[in-house]
Amino acid sequence: MPRYTVHVRGEWLAVPCLSSTNTIQWLGKEAVRRYMKNKPDNGGFSSVEEVKFYIRRCKGLGLLDLDDTVGDALEDNEFVEVVIEGDIMSPDFIPSQPEGVHLYSKYREPEQYISLDGNSLTTEDLVNLGKGLYKIKLTPEAEAKVKQSREVIERIVKEQTVVYGITTGFGKFARTVIPNSKLRELQVNLVRSHSAGVGKPLTPERSRMLLALRINVLAKGYSGISLETLEQVIEAFNASCLPYIPEKGTVGASGDLAPLSHLALGLIGEGKMWSPKSGWADAKYVLEAHGLKPITLKPKEGLALINGTQMITSLGCEAVERAGAIARQADIIAALTLEVLKGTTRAFDTDIHAVRPHRGQAEVAFRFRSLLDSDHHPSEIAESHRFCDRVQDAYTMRCCPQREGTGFHACRYLSYKMYFPCACLNFPLKMVFAEREETISGGNFHGEYPAKALDYLAIGVHELAAISERRIERLCNPSLSELPAFLVTEGGLNSGFMIAHCTAAALVSENKALCHPSSVDSLSTSAATEDHVSMGGWAARKALRVIEHVEQVLAIELLAACQGIEFLRPLRTTTPLEKVYDLVRSVVRPWMKDRFMAPDIEAAHRLLVEQKASVWEVAKPYIEKYRREHIPESRPISPTAFSLKMNADISHDHRHQDEL
C-alpha cells in the first residue's frame, strides 16, 4: 500500500493510500482532514470541503494537477506540500529546498566509494564527497579500531567507573555523577540542549562535507562510538539524508558543538532533515523514506558525535580548494588585462624573480611568461606598441607576481595546514585509547590552528581582488587605458562598465572588514570552563565570503578585459589568451550598448568556479607545455632560500598540492 508524507501548515503527516487510482485532490483532502483532527480548533476550519488548496512536490516545488491519480503523478513515499489558499507564507518559513539546492537538480546516487580509515582523507576527497560524487565505507582496519575503543566504554559502564561525559554531566556539571539507568537519556539531552544554532542552514554540499568529515574522525577509533551506530551514520550519508545545520553558533572550542549537535539531532530522528528525494521534512520521515531508522544513542555516543572542529575544517577545506582555483585564474585574467593596457612583460623576467626566495612570486611570474611570451605565442597587440616610449607600468601590472604571489603562498600554506585537520586531527575531548584501556580528557578539539590559518587565507586571497579592482579602474579610465571611457561607445548615452567597477570597489571594501582576524577574539563560555575559544567558525565562514567576493571582482575584470579587446580589433593577442577570450564570448556577447549587466557577471563568475569549463582549464595546457619546454628555468633553491621557505613548501603527500 503506497504512503505519502504531506506537509500542511508546518505539520508533517503520513497519509496511506489504499488505491493508486485515488486523485491528488483526494490526497490533499485526506491530509487536511488529518491536520484538522490533530488541532483543538480544527485548524480554524469547520469542514474539509470548505478548504481550498493546491499541492506541489517538495522536491522542485512543481505543482500537481488535482485531477491526476496518485499512481500516475507520485512515487511511493514521495513528499508533497498542501498550500492552503489565503495563507501568507511566514518570512521564517523553511523552504522545501535550501539555498543552492539547484545544484542538486541533477543529483544521481553515486556508485563509487571512498574508503575511510581516519588518516588519509584529503581536502580534494572531502570536496568531492560534498558534491555527492562518492559514497563512504570503512576500511577493515578502521572497523577494528572502532570496535576496540567501544569495548573500553562498555567496560567503564559495566564497572560504573566515574568518567567525564560517560557517567557524569558536562562542562560545569562534570562532577555530577549520572546513574546507569539514565546514561542513554544523558546523551540524548546533550544533543537536544546543544542544538542551539541560528541562521541559514548549510547547503547540501557543505552538510555532506561536515557529515563526511565527522565519519572520518569517528573512523579513527578514539571516540568510543559503536560500530553499529557509526554504520547508521554512514548509511544516512550514503542516502544523502542531511540534517538541518544552522551556520551560526560555534565558538570553535570544545569543538563546533552547536552545528554538530544539529547534525546529531537529525540522525536521532529529531529536527529537520533534507534529502534530494524529500526536500525539507521532519527527520524521522526523511529517514523512514530511505528505509533508515533513527539512531538510538548509547553511553558516550552523543558526545562522540558532537565534539570536534568539523564545521571549521570542512568549510576551511572548501575555502582552500576555491581559493587555489581563483588564485590560478587571477594570473590569467591579469595577463589579459596587461595585454589590453599594452603593458610590458619585462617585469616578469626569470632573473628578477630568482633573486627573491618566494615560490609564489616566481610561479606567478612564470605563468605570465607562459601566457605572454612572444617567442611562443606571437601577439599582434604586443607588436603594435613594441617601440613605444613607455618606460614601465603601474604597480597593478608590474608587481602582479609580488602581490598575487602572496595569494598563491596563502593557498599553499592553507592546503598544508588544512590537510592535517582533515586527515589527522579533530579528535574528541574525551579520547579513548584502546591499547591502554583508558580514556583521557584533552584539548585536541580546539580550533585555534585552522582558525589562524583561515584568517591568513582571507588576508592573502583578498589581495587578488584588491589589485584586480585597481586594474578595472585602469581599464575604465580613458586617461589611463587609451580606450573609450567605461569601455563603451557613445558614452553618455551608454554607461558601460561604470557601475560594474563600483560593484568591484564595494566588494573589495567589504573584504577589508571581513579580513579582520576572528581568531584574535575570545569570549569565555560554559561558566569559565571553556575560557579561551578560537572563533574558528566565523573565520571559516568569512573566509568563504571573502573568496566569493574575490571571484566576483575577477569576473568583472575578465569581462572588462575582453571588452577592451573589442576596441583593439583586428589585432589579436596570444593564442592562450585568445582561447580565454573565446570562452568568455561563448557565454557573454560584446558590450555594444547598455544592457542588463548582472547576468553577464554571473556568467563570467561561473566560468571561474566550474571545473570542467573554467578559464584555468582553457589556459592550463599552454602553461604546462611552456613549463615542459623551460625546465632549465626551474633552478635549484639555495640553502639560504630554502631555510626561508615556510612549512607550506615542505613536500607532503596529498595529491593536489602541485595544482596550487
Image: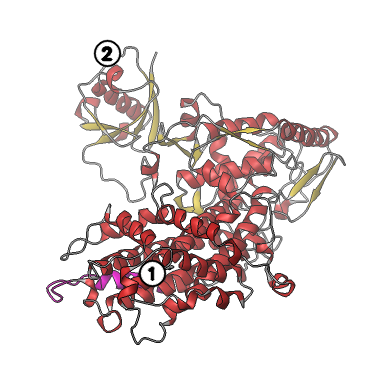
Q: Quadrant of the N terminus?
A: top left
At 32% across and 36% down in the image, what residue appears?
60
Which residue corresponds to mark 2?
21
Give the SS element for disc 1. helix
* Disc 2 to disc 1, C-alpha distance: 56 Å
State the extent of the magenta-drawn residues as a range. Answer: 489-509
At 28% across and 33% down in the image, what residue appears?
56
**Crowding at mark 2 (Cα within 10 Å: few <14, some 14-19, many 20+):** few
Question: In the rendered structure, are the residues bearing label 2 and label 1 in contact, judged by CB atoms less than 8 Å apart?
Answer: no
Residue 483 visible here? yes
Dot in front, 2 or 1: 1
Give the SS element for disc 2. loop
Q: Is residue 613 above or below residue 506?
A: above
Which residue corresponds to mark 1?
507
Q: In the rendered view, does 444 fall on the left or right side of 505?
A: right
Q: Amino acid at mark 1?
A: Leu
Q: Position of residue 402 (x, y in %)?
A: 53, 75
**Quick one: 625 or 652, which is closer to the camera?**
625
**Quick one: 152 or 638, which is closer to the camera?**
638
Magenta stretch: residue 133 in it?
no
Farthest front residue? 375
